């Protein structure tokens, strides 16, 4: 799944699509809902559930692609 998400984001960047954290979150959530929908229903031992937050997306992008999001001026 990670490879699929990374490939999708890289492809969009290569064709010139400007991506923000919220765009990337939408792509990630879409892939996960299609391929692994149960990830959003599983409760951890502490009662928390998976959440695709801004900070999670930014960490994922940095860890997988060494991308950082910058604010527009």
Image: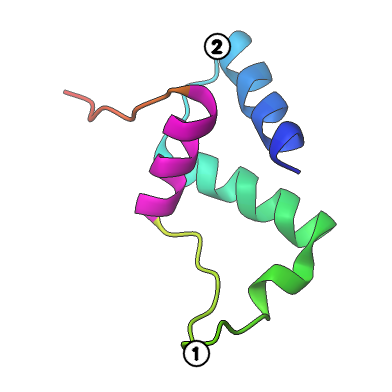
> Which residue shows up at 77% across the image and 67% down it?
37
Q: Quadrant of the N terminus?
A: top right
Dot 1 falls on a residue whose secondary structure is: loop
Q: Position of residue 36 (x, y in %)?
A: 79, 61
Query: In this view, which residue lies farthest toward the right?
Result: 35
Q: Which image quadrant: the C terminus?
A: top left
- Density class for disc 1 (Cα within 10 Å; few <14, some 14-19, many ≥20) is few
Mark 1 vs mark 2, CA separation in Å:
40 Å
Quadrant housing residue 41: bottom right
Which is the main secondary structure of the residues drawn in magenta? helix
- Lateral position of residue 50 relative to residue 22, left or right: right
Instruction: In this rendered view, identify the residue nearer to me: 65 or 69.
Output: 65
Does 63 sit above or below residue 15?
A: below
* Relative vertical location of residue 24 with respect to residue 17 in this rendering, above or below: below
Give whichever of 14, 4 is nearer the camera: 4
Question: Circle 2 sits in a helix, a strand or a loop, which is it?
Answer: loop
Task: Provide residue 58's location: percent of width, then percent of height.
Answer: 39, 41
Nearer-N-terminus badge (1/2): 2
- Given this view, does label 1 or label 2 mark the residue nearer the observer? 1
Asked if the residue under mark 2 is in contact with the one under mark 1, i.e. CB atoms within 8 Å, the reply is no
Q: Position of residue 55 (x, y in %)?
A: 35, 51
Res. 16 mark: 2
Where is residue 14? Give x, y as percent: 61, 9
Numbered circle sitting on residue 47: 1
Look at the image and give the residue range highlighted in magenta: 54-65
Question: Residue drawn 23% across and 30% down?
Answer: 71
Magenta-colored stretch includes residue 42: no
Mark 2: few/some/many CA within 10 Å (<14, 14-19, 20+): few
């Amino acid at each position: 799944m990670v490879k699929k998400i990374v490939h999708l984001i890289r492809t969009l960047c290569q064709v010139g699509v400007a991506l923000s954290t919220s765009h990337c979150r939408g792509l990630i959530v879409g892939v996960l809902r299609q391929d692994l929908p149960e990830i959003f229903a599983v409760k951890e031992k502490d009662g928390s559930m998976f959440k695709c937050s801004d900070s999670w997306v930014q960490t994922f992008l940095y860890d997988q692609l060494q991308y950082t999001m910058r604010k527009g001026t």
